[in-house]
Image: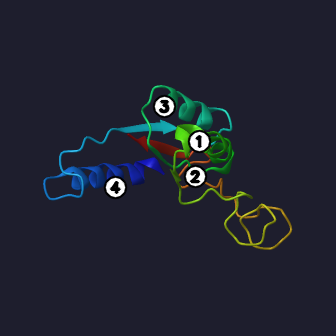
Amino acid sequence: MLKRTRPAIERAAELVTSPRGMLPGYPILINFRDSHCSETYGPLYGVDLYVKKLVHVFIGPSCDFSIAPLARLSSYWNAGGIPILTADGDDDGDDDGDDDGDDDGDNDGDDDSGDDGDDDGDDDGDDDDYCCLS
């Protein structure tokens, strides 16, 4: 996912900090990380960025395994929490609307789609990258 969103994030930062932007001349630093859709790596990278004082907002991750622990931690940071912007963050890992945990929409809990759940064209399920802005 990051290979599709990274250019948009970088371009948005350029536009916002341009002389005609909302924050002219304001430095925006972008740090990108790969959460590996992991309940370990996702929050670990978030903690690392927080401790190094390199984060004001997280964009992603989209995988619930990574976002859930990061959201729990970041809600206590900086007296009001650090915002997390994500397009997914679902709780059952599917997108068919039936709450059975698969992507095929038939309510049997068995994913008959053959899809690994990511959008990067392979079968490893590791499409859940994220970044932070500071």
What kind of residue is marked 4?
Answer: Ala
Q: Which residue is mark 2?
A: 62
Q: Residue at x 13, y 53 (%)?
A: 19
State how far apart marks 3 and 2 are (Cα): 18 Å
Q: Which residue occupies the extreme left position in the image? A: 19
SS assignment at label 4:
helix
Q: Position of residue 124 (x, y in %)?
A: 62, 43
Residue neighbourhood size for the residue with mark 3, other residues' Cα within 10 Å, grouped as few (<14), some (14–19), many (≥20) = many
Q: Which residue is mark 4?
A: 8
Q: Which residue is mark 1?
A: 74
Question: Disc 1 or disc 2, which is closer to the eye?
Answer: 1
State how far apart marks 4 and 3 are (Cα): 21 Å
Q: Earlier in the sequence, mark 1 or mark 2?
A: 2
What kind of residue is marked 1?
Answer: Ser
Q: Position of residue 12 (x, y in %)?
A: 29, 55
**Vertical arrangement, residue 48 with respect to residue 66, above or below:** above
**Vertical arrangement, residue 51 with respect to residue 124, above or below:** above
